[in-house]
């Protein structure tokens, strides 16, 4: 497949004045050095240079289109009033409705939500979904709330950001510490407000409320497709390939199990916050799954008896000499400090942002193939898209149809990026940004700028 990146011909279209900013205003708030926002903006900056984008276009893509901050009051179970800060950021609607998760975490702030919304625009454009990016969240530790308080907080938040949501405006999904129950409350609050059933307002819902089959496994399955395709490109076979997975949660667990069951990979290590297990001959994942299911904490800690696996550290796991390393836990795990010790041939980023900019440069230099998060973990948003399509037509597919659509889209996007990176001699992350920003810029360019005055 041939991929063409075209420079935006700013001089001959209706938005020519986008190139005429006399001086370059800074973005609304300077990002914290080393933050996800500053990394994302740095990556965008080098992409803009490669595409030779005009100044005005850079400013548009660098900054979110719309941002909403809300102060959410709830009545606690004790009868007090508690107040939380919430955010919804829409980065771009140039290619379609905005799409992105809602996270509940004490660390949520405007900077983080802006960065994540931008990354969603990039991710949707990389896999060519008709969506722009958004993200939202509340600065809260949900573990401090009772289920009733969590429901009140969610419903109040949904009502407060409703003016900018909509099945063809902005469609939330679950993210860190939110789940299908939270999406069900969102959908019910909005349907009640609108006076009609609106399942297309969120994705990641329970199946009974219009959720899609295959959504839970989707991100892990997408990671698997990215890993298998990469091995094939490198002339390696997945059968017997040694794989280490950091983070045995939703993404990591599905990826590990599908790789073993459907492709015959040898899962030599898995980890979570509590422990890391290693067996060079391959872990018995049925026993690991059984242990996690029986452990009240749902964690790996306490897996035994001795002889089934060695207990190593997460740092040891990242340095194992494996064919494929899948960081599927949290951001910032492979850094300038430990990138030299990574001995994997391929890294497939299940988590968002597990590799820092410094680490990326070191790994590229050393010839380690890194399949970036914006491609590798896009399976989740692809199946969210499929859920939205099913909701809009009130017609639901079987699991085979969902898996086959996911697989077709992931493989096509992988092939396109692999070709582009080979043709331009770029690493896969830079190629992904290039393809995505080019698509977003072209959409902005082709839509032109709407002038309310008609001028
Ligand atoms: P999860 O909470 O289900 O699982 C996370 C796992 O990582 C848990 O096993 C946890 O114990 C482990 N973990 C946390 N900190 C760790 C550490 N310091 N060292 C080792 N293990 C650690 O979350 P998830 O849904 O699987 O998401 C994982 C990552 O994938 C996140 O970065 C998320 O943003 C990203 N992601 C998830 C989806 C999705 O559909 N779930 C989609 C795209 C991206």
Image (cartoon, helix red, strand yellow):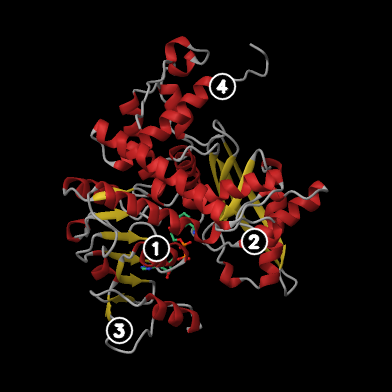
Dot label at residue 447: 4
In this rendering, the answer to whether 197 lies above or below 163 is below
Beta carbon of the mark 2 residue lies under 8 A of ligand 1: no
Q: Earlier in the sequence, mark 4 or mark 3?
A: 3
In this rendering, the answer to whether 450 lies above or below 362 is above
Foreground of the two, 11 or 420 = 420
Residue that label 3 marks? 308
Of tags 4 and 1, the one toward the viewer is 1
SS assignment at label 2: helix
Q: Residue at x 65, y 53 (%)?
A: 71
In the rendered image, residue 438, in percent from the top left (x then y), is placed at: 41, 29
Q: Is residue 256 visible?
A: yes
Q: Earlier in the sequence, mark 2 or mark 4?
A: 2
Residue that label 1 marks? 262
Residue that label 2 marks? 182
SS assignment at label 4: helix
Foreground of the two, 137 or 189 = 189
Residue closest to the far right? 195
């Amino acid at each position: 497949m041939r991929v063409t990146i075209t420079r935006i011909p700013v001089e001959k279209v209706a938005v020519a004045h986008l190139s005429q900013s006399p001086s370059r205003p800074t973005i609304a708030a300077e990002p914290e050095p080393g933050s996800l926002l500053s990394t994302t903006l740095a990556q965008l900056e080098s992409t803009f240079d490669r595409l030779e984008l005009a100044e005005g276009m850079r400013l548009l893509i660098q900054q979110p289109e719309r941002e909403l901050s809300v102060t959410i009051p709830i009545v606690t179970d004790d009868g007090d009033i508690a107040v939380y800060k919430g955010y919804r950021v829409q980065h771009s609607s140039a290619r379609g409705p905005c799409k992105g998760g809602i996270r509940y975490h004490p660390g949520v702030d405007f900077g983080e939500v802006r960065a994540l919304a931008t990354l969603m625009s990039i991710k949707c454009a990389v896999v060519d979904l008709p969506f722009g990016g958004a993200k939202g969240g509340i600065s809260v530790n949900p573990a401090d709330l009772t289920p009733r308080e969590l429901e009140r907080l969610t419903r109040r938040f949904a009502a407060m950001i409703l003016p900018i949501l909509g099945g063809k405006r902005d469609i939330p999904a679950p993210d860190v510490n939110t789940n299908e129950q939270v999406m069900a409350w969102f959908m019910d609050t909005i349907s009640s407000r609108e006076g009609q059933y609106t399942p297309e307002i969120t994705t990641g819902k329970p199946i009974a409320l219009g959720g899609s089959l295959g959504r839970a496994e989707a991100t892990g399955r997408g990671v698997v497709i990215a890993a298998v395709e990469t091995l094939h490109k490198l002339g390696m076979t997945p059968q017997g390939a040694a794989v280490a997975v950091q983070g045995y949660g939703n993404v990591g667990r599905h990826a590990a199990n599908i790789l073993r069951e459907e492709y015959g990979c040898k899962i030599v290590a898995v980890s979570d916050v509590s422990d890391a297990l290693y067996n060079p001959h391959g872990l018995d994942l049925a026993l690991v799954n059984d242990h996690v299911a029986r452990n009240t904490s749902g964690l790996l800690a306490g897996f035994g008896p001795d002889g089934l696996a060695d207990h190593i550290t997460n740092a040891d796991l990242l340095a194992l000499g494996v064919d494929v390393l899948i960081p599927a836990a949290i951001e910032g795990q492979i850094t300038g400090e430990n990138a030299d010790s990574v001995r994997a041939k391929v890294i497939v980023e299940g988590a968002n942002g597990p590799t820092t900019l410094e680490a990326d440069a070191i790994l590229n230099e050393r010839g380690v193939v890194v399949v970036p998060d914006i491609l590798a973990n896009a399976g989740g948003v692809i199946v969210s898209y499929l859920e939205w399509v099913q909701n809009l037509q009130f017609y639901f597919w079987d699991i085979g149809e969902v898996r086959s659509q996911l697989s077709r889209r992931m493989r096509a996007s992988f092939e396109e990026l692999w070709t582009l990176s080979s043709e331009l001699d770029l690493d896969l992350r830079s190629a992904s940004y290039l393809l995505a920003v080019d698509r977003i810029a072209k959409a902005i360019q082709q839509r032109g700028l709407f002038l309310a005055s008609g001028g």
